[in-house]
Amino acid sequence: MAHEWTRPDDYDGVPRPLVSVGKDYPPSFELATHVHGRGQLLYAAKGAVVITTPAGSWVAPPERAVWTPAGTPHAVRMVGEVSTRSVLLDLEASRRIGDDSMVLAVTPLLRHLLIAASEAPLLYDEAGRDGKVVALLITELERAERVPLATPMPADRRMAALCQAFIERPAPHDTIDAWAARLGMDRRAFTRRFRRETGLSFGAWRQQACVLAALPWLAEGRSVTAVALDLGYDSPAAFSTMFRRLIGVSPTRYATDKTV
């Protein structure tokens, strides 16, 4: 069984490259901002999680996981009932994954490796089966697909204020011209600045922010039609197309199948 943690630094000194941690959480539970001395891959075997850092927010719906590098302050919000199966990697192993927060695709193989690692003792035999499982798990994490499912926040304070207002009240028909006008910028200067600050085009960022808003609403039991209309989409079909492209499943399946 995966080990539980009560303090963020509980396993920093464990002489193993990987520690598996896990816990069950009730709906809407929030973990206040904290820091791990190890890199963390947070995977929800059930439910979904939203991780927020000073640089933005990352969402891990079913079959996705969020990588947070060591030393990164982050808060976690649970969407629905959540059962986590996560791993903490030492600094050497963490370097193989990356120095930036990101969302990774969880393949069936990776999912089974996470489960197998959760059954290993804390001081597993590095030369035995558990050590081989861990070595393969780290290799699979290194080569896992990076999924563009995040809402990075710009460093520019005025631009960040617009982004935060959008996250709190999504409006999918907001335009580049409208945002540029609010900031007193021309369209070209705005688009260049926005991409430089967030790493995303305005359209891609807007869609991902809408998904972040939709996940908890669907988990609460709202209908797909209601969520689509609340987000300002012209039709449930348009919303469903966007949702499936980013999440990998339809909003109907996401809302009804809690184990996907």
Image: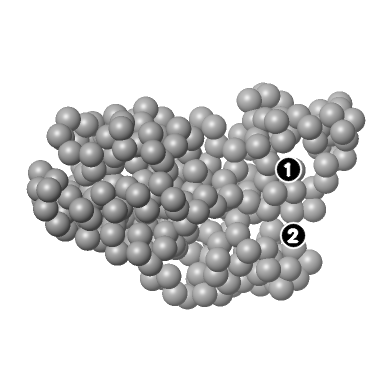
| Three-letter code, disc 2 | Gly
Of residues 56 and 225, which is closer to you in this image? 56
For numbered disc 1, what is the local secondary structure? loop
70 displayed left or right of 255: left
Residue 55 horizontal/vertical position (percent): 54, 32
Residue placed furthest toward the right: 186
Residue at 67 percent across and 45 percent down: it is: 205
Outermost residue toward the front in this view:
127
- Horizontal and vertical percent for residue 22? 25, 52
- Which residue is located at x 63 percent, y 51 percent? 208
Q: Earlier in the sequence, mark 1 or mark 2?
A: 1
Here the colouring is one colour
Pointer 2 residue = 232
The picture quadrant where one finds residue 109 is: bottom left
Label 2 Cα crowd, 10 Å radius (few <14 / some 14-19 / many 20+): some
Say if residue 60 shows up in the picture.
Answer: no
Residue where numbered disc 1 is placed: 201
Q: Position of residue 98 (x, y in %)?
A: 44, 37
Q: Quadrant of the C terminus?
A: bottom left
**Residue in the image at 68% along x and 68% along y:** 241
Residue 87, visible in the rendered structure: yes
Q: Is residue 150 left or right of residue 80?
A: right
Q: Nearer the viewer, residue 146 or 12?
A: 146
Relative to residue 224, is residue 32 depicted above or below?
Answer: above
Tell me which residue sits at (56%, 62%) in the image. Answer: 247
Q: CA distance from mark 1 to mark 2?
A: 20 Å
